[in-house]
Amino acid sequence: MIIYQFDGSLTGLLSCIFRAFQFKQFEVQLALEHQVQDSLFAKSIVVASHEQQAQRVWMGLTQKLSSEGIKRFHYTFLSEQLIAFQHLFNFAIYVFQSPFSIEKNYGHADVLGVSQWTKQVGREKHRMEAFVRFKKTQEGLFISLVGPDFNVLPLIEKHFKARYQDQKWLIYDEKRHYGIYYDLNQIHQV
């Protein structure tokens, strides 16, 4: 067994996929760098995030998958769960090794896994869109502190920009220590 340790970023995950094809290592277990445990039976390799390699893999995925398939890949990644990352890794290997579209082959465990994670993240996105409540500060800024189960702030930006385009607002994710701020012109990550 081979373990690929990576930093948990999308670039890191895509770099793991690139390395798998580079060295023909397809039976791989993923681990986050800070969570790896020593094993007598597994060879552990730290895979650095490499922007150019990640770009090549991403371009390949966009050519092999529909826009819905890319959306599912992105949503699943935003779950931030190691098991979801493993599904994405295996899913990408399957995509690149298959000469035909595999997106609807729910008999394959990783296609099904990606679909299920997409649904969970999608539900969290809708929950945040429905239940985020703002409080007005003395400076006139509307602020909301949230703690979603998954990293859905990138998914809810568009909704809140359209809905509250005449107000300055900040939605801050207390779990992930970042937020999205709208200044009446554009959205910024803070």
Image (cartoon, rainbow, N blue to C red):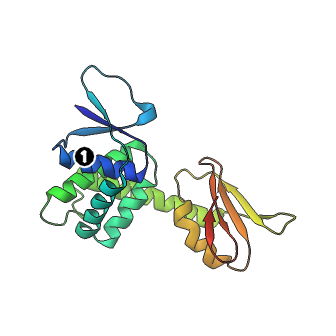
Q: Nearer the viewer, residue 43 or 172?
A: 43
Q: Secondary structure at mark 1?
A: helix
Q: Nearer the viewer, residue 89 or 109?
A: 89
Measured along the vertical axis of the image, is residue 184 above or below residue 53? below
Name the residue carrying label 1.
19
User: Residue 119: x, y in percent?
Assistant: 42, 60
Q: Amino acid at mark 1?
A: Arg
| Location of residue 68 by image quarter | bottom left
Measured along the vertical axis of the image, is residue 9 above or below residue 44? below
User: Residue 132: x, y in percent?
Assistant: 67, 63
What crowding class fits label 1: few (fewer than 14 Cα within 10 Å), some (14-19), or many (20 or more)? Answer: some
Q: Nearer the viewer, residue 168 or 133?
A: 168
Taking the image as shown, residue 91 lies to the left or right of residue 84, namely left
Q: Quadrant of the C terminus?
A: bottom right
Residue sitting farthest toward the left: 99
Taking the image as shown, residue 173 lies to the left or right of residue 42, namely right
User: Residue 104: x, y in percent?
Assistant: 24, 64
Q: Quadrant of the N terminus?
A: top left
Name which residue lies at 33% across and 57% down: 52
